[in-house]
Amino acid sequence: MASYHGKKEKKPRAPLEDDRYKGFSKGEKDLYKEMNIIEKKEAKHKKEEEAKTAAFFAKKSYGRQMPVPTKKAENKDAFGHNSEDALIEWEKNQIKPLFREFDKDKKGISKESLVAIMKRLKQDECIIGKTPYCEESEFESLFA
């Protein structure tokens, strides 16, 4: 028991482990330590995910690579040639006014109109860079 001669018995202090937690209560110290552990785990997990994603995309091949300055002449020669069979949405929208010109009453386009449209597409009037890959003499046989 403690003596009551004017002095109170003091309990021995627990040694401080780290100066960065000085001034915090025991609960706060525990909280900060646990948060540090959680943050380290999350950083490790994020780094693993990034490595996994990089490995995944390293395996993928997306066909033709991005043009580089050394391929400038090759890219210039390829421009305007029929590199794909299908048209993208932008190219379709560029062609729509041409069809509207021939189908003003919206009742359909005649065979002669289709041949005229093909001739204008062959001249690349819509400026899409893709032209029909056939001769003008074959246009009529396409719509037979």
Image (cartoon, rainbow, N blue to C red):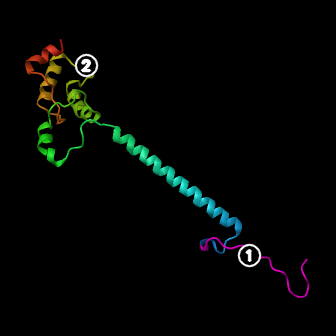
How far apart marks 1 and 2 lie (CA) works out to 95 Å
- Based on the picture, tell me whether residue 2 belongs to the magenta stretch: yes
Q: Is residue 138 above or below residue 30?
A: above
The residue stretch that appears in magenta: 1-19
Q: Give the residue pinned by disc 2.
A: 108
Labelled pair 1, 2 in contact (Cβ < 8 Å): no
Could you tell me residue 14's position as x and y percent? 72, 73
Q: How many marks are shown on the rendered structure?
A: 2
Q: Earlier in the sequence, mark 1 or mark 2?
A: 1
Could you tell me residue 65's position as x and y percent? 24, 41
Residue type, numbered disc 1: Arg
Residue type, numbered disc 2: Gly
At 15% from the left edge and 17% from the top edge, which residue is drawn? 112
- Residue 11, image quadrant: bottom right
At 23% from the left edge and 25% from the top edge, which residue is drawn? 104
- Mark 1 residue element: loop
Please give the label number shown on residue 96.
Answer: none
At 14% from the left edge and 45% from the top edge, which residue is drawn? 72
Q: Give the residue pinned by disc 1.
A: 13
Between 85 and 43, the residue placed more toward the observer is 43
Q: Nearer the viewer, mark 1 or mark 2?
A: 1
